[in-house]
Amino acid sequence: MERQHKKIPVGVLGATGMVGQRFIELLQNHPWFEVVALAASGKHNGRSYAESTVWRLSGSDMPATAAALPVVACRPEEMPDVKIVFSALPGEIAGEIEIAFAQAGVAVFSNAKNHRMAADVPLLIPEVNADHIAAVAQQQRQRGWSGFIITNANCSSTPLVMALKPLQQAFGVSKVLVTTLQSISGAGYPGLPSYDIIDNAIPYISGEEEKVESETLKMLGDWREGQGFADAPLVVSAHCNRVATREGHLECASIELERDASPEEIIATWENYVPEPQSVQLPSAPVHALHYRHEHDRPQTLRDRDAGNGMTVTLGRLRRCPILSYKFVMLGHNTIRGAAGGSILNAEWCVHKGLL
Amino acid sequence: MERQHKKIPVGVLGATGMVGQRFIELLQNHPWFEVVALAASGKHNGRSYAESTVWRLSGSDMPATAAALPVVACRPEEMPDVKIVFSALPGEIAGEIEIAFAQAGVAVFSNAKNHRMAADVPLLIPEVNADHIAAVAQQQRQRGWSGFIITNANCSSTPLVMALKPLQQAFGVSKVLVTTLQSISGAGYPGLPSYDIIDNAIPYISGEEEKVESETLKMLGDWREGQGFADAPLVVSAHCNRVATREGHLECASIELERDASPEEIIATWENYVPEPQSVQLPSAPVHALHYRHEHDRPQTLRDRDAGNGMTVTLGRLRRCPILSYKFVMLGHNTIRGAAGGSILNAEWCVHKGLL
Amino acid sequence: MERQHKKIPVGVLGATGMVGQRFIELLQNHPWFEVVALAASGKHNGRSYAESTVWRLSGSDMPATAAALPVVACRPEEMPDVKIVFSALPGEIAGEIEIAFAQAGVAVFSNAKNHRMAADVPLLIPEVNADHIAAVAQQQRQRGWSGFIITNANCSSTPLVMALKPLQQAFGVSKVLVTTLQSISGAGYPGLPSYDIIDNAIPYISGEEEKVESETLKMLGDWREGQGFADAPLVVSAHCNRVATREGHLECASIELERDASPEEIIATWENYVPEPQSVQLPSAPVHALHYRHEHDRPQTLRDRDAGNGMTVTLGRLRRCPILSYKFVMLGHNTIRGAAGGSILNAEWCVHKGLL
Amino acid sequence: MERQHKKIPVGVLGATGMVGQRFIELLQNHPWFEVVALAASGKHNGRSYAESTVWRLSGSDMPATAAALPVVACRPEEMPDVKIVFSALPGEIAGEIEIAFAQAGVAVFSNAKNHRMAADVPLLIPEVNADHIAAVAQQQRQRGWSGFIITNANCSSTPLVMALKPLQQAFGVSKVLVTTLQSISGAGYPGLPSYDIIDNAIPYISGEEEKVESETLKMLGDWREGQGFADAPLVVSAHCNRVATREGHLECASIELERDASPEEIIATWENYVPEPQSVQLPSAPVHALHYRHEHDRPQTLRDRDAGNGMTVTLGRLRRCPILSYKFVMLGHNTIRGAAGGSILNAEWCVHKGLL
């Protein structure tokens, strides 16, 4: 879709970390947004982004426009021109800072966990629950904000919810048992010590299983005007593991459908899924939100994480489960679709819907 | 336990491969068994084991006694002195060869899949179904063999069955949904190309899920004299994944118990489990068949695979499952407990019970 | 540079292997060349490339045009339309096959080692020894061929030679002691078993040190009309190691210069190096043949291998050597610059110079 | 060698880190030493070692005796009973603390870099420069200490010096050009972020090349009574790299000998090297200080690091170098021989020589 006007000035909070760097990489040459301000926690001595940051993404160098920007403190008055901030702040500090920006009239698109489960904050994936942005009006009214906060989901909840949504619509989903094999980049930087993960797998990620089990219900649930969010009538059980891959979360799920369907019907449901971001061709929307691969050993973390520039969720291995109805495998890029790219798509959706 | 007599002469079939090497490593200085013959498929020109084999195990060098032995063909007449053979042959050729040895009066302890599900062949883990060796008498009678075949389970079935057995006895188990993170050594040598697995996870292992789903029922089932094996009344659903670890299979399970139990009861059941191989102190039996770790992030593949010299199954992370009764994590060493070490323990059990 | 005519029809020999796949990936949408024929050794039953090949490159899917082509045998009569073949054949069979194509009038651009050191075959890197293509006329005359063979260098020789060439021109280079850290993809597919390299480094690659020590002299040497190739007056000593990286060969060199130069002069020599492929902007020539990075810890295998779409050699860490004159680090992408991409650039150079 | 008396009480400084844990692991059941005190930097609230430390070594659990000890501050008065402390402190704080212990009458065996190059502090490897402990008398005299400090070398200097010593004695060595492939454990814990090293190699380790280039000269040099240490007349040039291995530093060296020798002579010199720690059979001395492997592709990091319980240096691939005299490969375990095990051996040597 085209958008002829001047680009919207945006800022990045937590710009020096791994997800912050992804934001800057993905916003480079964005057709609608222009990065004009970068902020980080810690001391600031007027140093530029280039001077204060070691670029850690492997496929790119630091964009020159970002390199020249000063790194400022995470306060609205330090970024007076921005209409949008993308927040890659850690949970320890994100809560208050994001509120300050929303109060100051800024649209906050956040990766942090702090406000995700709030009763008036959308936990948004435009391909899944695009209508949840209706909660923004109530959020602004109740809190007296001129800005607002919209969050995106945890990186392991995102591909799961995207895979489930069309099945929920078509057949109903009542139970989901999911086991994840998550990449090291999900732990940020410096994150996981190499001595902990080379030749190892760790069956625990702090707080992760709880997030998958709760966020999924909110995202697949309804926004009811005047009443708030209603969880989807679904039970989720998650086992989360860390493995020695760089990017991409692989997930094995068994699900119970409310009405039976053949494997062909399920695959067709995924393959024919064209939600609004794809229909209206938002700049960051991949051509296919979901891609089902028919090979017997796909998706694989390495080979499929970059599908749709990291925004497509890849599915495969659908087969009957002897205990629940079906089992299958899915994969999503955790720092693109599950973090920075997801937030940018959220902002694009809000622009498209006139919230900005 | 002591055993004063002369050592029993044994042979190894498939001696040059990864599991074959494990057999030779583990049988070095064994108190009951002495390796006197080594066989492999392929051409044999009277070359010694040292000349025809590259030793691939990282913690050891090739034992000198094995190094000097000639590598012979996999035929009983080439190994006239052995009373026992340990078979590490690949499934493509194991079936016929193992039968030939059993016909010739040799006790065959096999890692191969070929005879595992046969109606008169024990699929044996002495800590789980020690009484299944009663099938040997029927096997010999029906087939007219003076020797016999006893198999051990697939490397991913083994820790699962060991974890389930005491729970089955104490509370009943009706459903098991398990997702594995399996090591590369499970694919043998050369096995998995490095280009396929570095920075990758692969959600598929050929034939593996079917083995876990069927072998578990046989091992947890009963041997009924005159009737044969009866499967345990249990449903198993498996997702099997390959990850970039060297040794050790990590498995995440959700299980349904037939009668409820508290977490403390379950852990106590595991911790108090002392089956016969431990009671009678078979040479390869670890002090603890099962070890429950109370840390929040254990077992881990790297840190726990060598527990009990690779023969202990390590458990952890027991918690309620929102869908089935409980979820937990287990880990077993795939080429020791799940292969060579398991077979040796099977042979020790048979010696102890007077079958040899 | 532009080239308005119809695309040149080309074929790929050894199309199913790792380097063959790189050729197909890189030739997709090439402005001058069009892949019209694919060949591989082994049995051929008229199956298409898609049916007979598992695509192993992680960043892409099999190009649709290649997928539909039949895989034929490596004989000129099976590929009657091609003017050029790119050979990714293994050394065991490449020699005779490539000769057959050259005899049949085809221009052969080969990755194989077989003809590299022949007295009338260019070992070509257009940024280094562009004039060596003059040997083709003699090759055709002596051998009576209407086609010809041009080879590219071993993947570890390539970045070394590119780094040395401008220094040789400016200061003279008399000694080079190089130690490599080479990626697993250099061993092809299936290549290196994962069990050999995860958590390991191997200080040996068969034949590799000899290639680096001899190829470098030929490439940095002269083609003298009527006399043949004269080696550069240089001594090279190589230690070659395999490490657990996917793509990219990192190399640490100490060199002796014939006349002294300051570090600044050396770096400037590299940074100002603009050889002909860059001047005339061949389609596969990167903007910078060499890129010196000033960070203290670069180049790194992961972060720098994709520089210039894998065609730029990245340099860094220049410092005085207490034994020879200087030491520095270099990195090149082994399956792009050091293999398929290098061969394509060679073909482009020959087209540019009118040999085709 | 036997030693009948009561065990010597020892302490560990920096007990919670990676090298500190190695000390505790290696001192468990030591015949001469008994760990009675553990100290670490940071806050201390009377918590036990078990309560304040996550055990990170993969092959073992925390020794029960250590687990029960309180963690105290790094001050002599907190560890009044110890005769020896082993220091695994980081360089930022080791200097002053180690001096305080030496002043208080304690024998300090340190892994830290701080005092290594001091004019009166031995940089000791008992197989190399056992007589350097003569400097202790001068150290005590000059500094007025009743205790003393003895250091061990950097983990990458250690195997190099051990390989060179017998060659220096037999043939003279004038030049050494060494390139290392070092393991992640060399960076301590948390040390190297996994995101920096998986699928990567880094050609830089802060301060490492300088240490190799200077420590080698001191260790291979002489202690001259009344004059001090005299560097060996040797030039060393080092390139240091980090690769994705867990333990073990692999090093490729080219060396110049002062008088020529055949490969057989050199290998024999290594194989016949039996220095005093081996002659007198110190408890931590491996049977072979050096082990030359004749395979064409050894030593390898994974397969050879545990040779001699991590205390043997493994050599291989000796061949002529076209530039210097010879090239070869060596491997040493960095956290055992190159750190904790080396220090313990130093202490054993001092006990043997009556310094304690």
Image (cartoon, coloured by chain):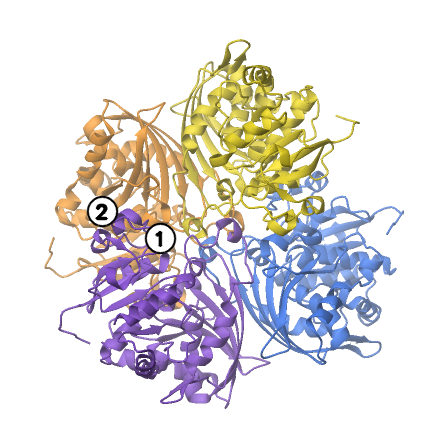
Chain colours: A blue, B purple, C yellow, D orange
Answer with left or right where residue D137 lies relative to residue C352.
left
Relative to C281, say whether C304 is above or below: below
Q: In this view, does D326 lie to the left or right of C209?
A: left
Q: Which x, y percent locates residue D24?
A: 30, 59
Residue B119 figure quarter: bottom left
Q: Whole-percent x and y of residue B55?
A: 32, 51
- Quarter of image, res A104: bottom right
Circle 2 chain: D
Residue B228, image x and y in percent? 40, 85
Left or right: residue C246 compared with residue B305: right
Q: Which of A52 and D279 is in front in this view?
A: D279
Foreground pick, C282 / C17:
C17
**Structural crowding at the residue carrying mark 1, measured as other residues with C-alpha within 10 Å and reported as few (<14), some (14–19) or many (≥20):** few
Does residue D308 appear in this view? yes
Indicate the amino acid at tag 1. Gly
Q: Where is residue B193 in the image (x, y as percent from the top left)?
A: 48, 51
The residue under the point 63% across, 33% down is C77
- Disc 1 marks which residue? B42
Tag 2: amino acid: Asn
Q: In this view, does C208 lie above or below C174?
A: below
Residue nearer the viewer, A195 or A246? A246
Mark 2 lies on residue:
D346
Real-space Cα separation, disc 1 to disc 2, in angstroms: 51 Å
